[in-house]
Image (spheres, rainbow, N blue to C red):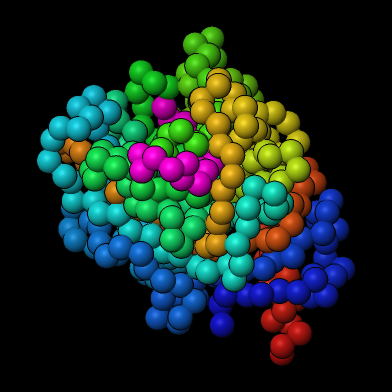
């Protein structure tokens, strides 16, 4: 069984890589199809197109240990509300966490992923996110922008969002994003939504706070990278939510070398959900019960807004908030070591 529920005893003795105890409550390594194996469900039709514009599953285990995500979707900022629907269709691969977590809890989650360069095409002057994170099995819909249904229906989520599109609004951008619970109005998503969007024309990257900070340093691995994040590189992403401080932090490392690409675990700017940098909205209460990989339905457009293939090597959630020590990679290292220990114990 690939969805691992690892207890603290399994991890004893290997937590030296983390400054606080971490328990992996969920771990998926995609050695086989998690839907066929009963570990995950597909919300929506699992319908998309590949980079050659041929019909393809949105999520498929292409080889043991690799889940392929085909994202081919639309979002037309310049012509909001006009234009035909694209071939993209909202769908989501979700794993039940077994309980509900709110803004009062602390937790961490992450994934190992590679954004493939072949066929990668984010249209200019558009916006569409590569996204994964925590969702609510009932209240998190597929249409976060409202551009297709006219009604924003995606509530209750804590997400990693990467917008690779470049535009006058400052993209590419990399964000921790929190969408709160519905406030009563059916179109209220943007009234309870937090992300760091801070326009700073003096810093390369415009609105984006995280990538602007990293790319401004000529010695940084991301300096000069066109899309902000690298293509064809396996990256380990760790997201940490602090229920007391109401903040979300992010760390991204190069899996092969352990080099830190993005780190605001111990530095700013993390996301304060009550007071995001730039004053872009705020989020109060949320309720999540699932780990999800998303193909949001966003969009009206005359041409695809984002065409991408993403390969996932693992996904995980921990009911704790570990802070990786410098040079150790990320909390995913802890989870992987825990899995190895579990396998040894079973042998």
Point 56% across, 48% down: residue: 286
Residue 341 falls in which quadrant of the image? bottom right
Residue 58: in magenta span: no
Q: Relative to 230, is 167 on the left or the right?
A: left
Q: Residue 176's x, y, as percent?
A: 55, 39
Quadrant of the image for the N terminus?
bottom right
Give the quarter of the figure containing the C terminus: bottom right
Write the residue at 80% across / 71% down: 8
Q: Position of residue 340 (x, y in %)?
A: 70, 74
Outermost residue, bottom side: 347
Q: Nearer the viewer, residue 62 or 131?
A: 131
Is-magenta flag for residue 176? Answer: yes
Q: Position of residue 112 (x, y in %)?
A: 55, 56
Residue pictured at 76% horizontal, 74% vertical: 7
**Residue 50 seen from this side:** no
User: Is 138 rendered above or below residue 83?
Assistant: below
283 lies above or below 294: above
Q: Check the image and name the residue furthest to the front.
A: 184
Chain part drawn in magenta:
171-187
Question: On screen, 159 above or below 283?
Answer: below
Q: Quadrant of residue 41?
A: bottom left
């Amino acid at each position: 069984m690939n969805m691992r529920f690892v207890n603290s005893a399994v991890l004893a003795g290997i937590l030296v890589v983390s400054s606080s105890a971490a328990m992996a409550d969920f771990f998926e390594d995609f050695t086989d199809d998690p839907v066929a194996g009963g570990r995950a469900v597909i919300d929506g039709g699992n319908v998309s197109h590949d980079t050659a514009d041929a019909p393809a599953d949105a999520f498929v285990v292409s080889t043991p240990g690799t889940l392929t995500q085909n994202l081919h979707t639309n979002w037309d900022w310049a012509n909001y509300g006009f234009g035909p629907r694209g071939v993209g269709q909202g769908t989501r691969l979700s794993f039940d966490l077994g309980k509900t977590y709110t803004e009062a809890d602390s937790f961490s989650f992450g994934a190992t992923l590679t954004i493939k360069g072949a066929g990668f095409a984010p249209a200019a002057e558009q916006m569409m996110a590569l996204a994964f994170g925590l969702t609510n099995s009932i209240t998190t819909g597929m249409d976060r922008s409202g551009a297709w249904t006219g009604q924003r229906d995606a509530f209750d989520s804590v997400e990693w969002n990467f917008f690779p599109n470049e535009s006058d609004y400052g993209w590419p951008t990399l964000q921790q994003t929190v969408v709160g619970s519905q406030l009563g109005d059916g179109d209220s998503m943007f009234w309870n939504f937090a992300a760091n969007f801070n326009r700073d024309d003096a810093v390369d990257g415009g609105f984006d706070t995280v990538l602007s900070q990293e790319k401004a340093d000529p010695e940084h691995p991301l300096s000069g990278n066109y899309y902000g994040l690298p293509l064809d590189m396996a990256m380990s992403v760790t997201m940490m939510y602090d229920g007391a401080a109401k903040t979300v932090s992010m760390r991204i490392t190069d899996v092969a070398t352990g080099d830190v690409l993005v780190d605001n675990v111990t530095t700013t700017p993390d996301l304060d959900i009550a007071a995001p940098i730039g004053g872009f909205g705020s989020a109060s209460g949320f309720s999540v019960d699932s780990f999800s990989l998303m193909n949001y339905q966003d969009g009206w457009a005359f041409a695809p807004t984002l065409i991408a293939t993403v390969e996932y090597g693992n996904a995980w959630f921990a009911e704790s908030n570990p802070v990786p020590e410098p040079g150790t990679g990320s909390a995913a290292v802890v989870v992987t070591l825990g899995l190895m220990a579990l396998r040894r114990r079973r042998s």
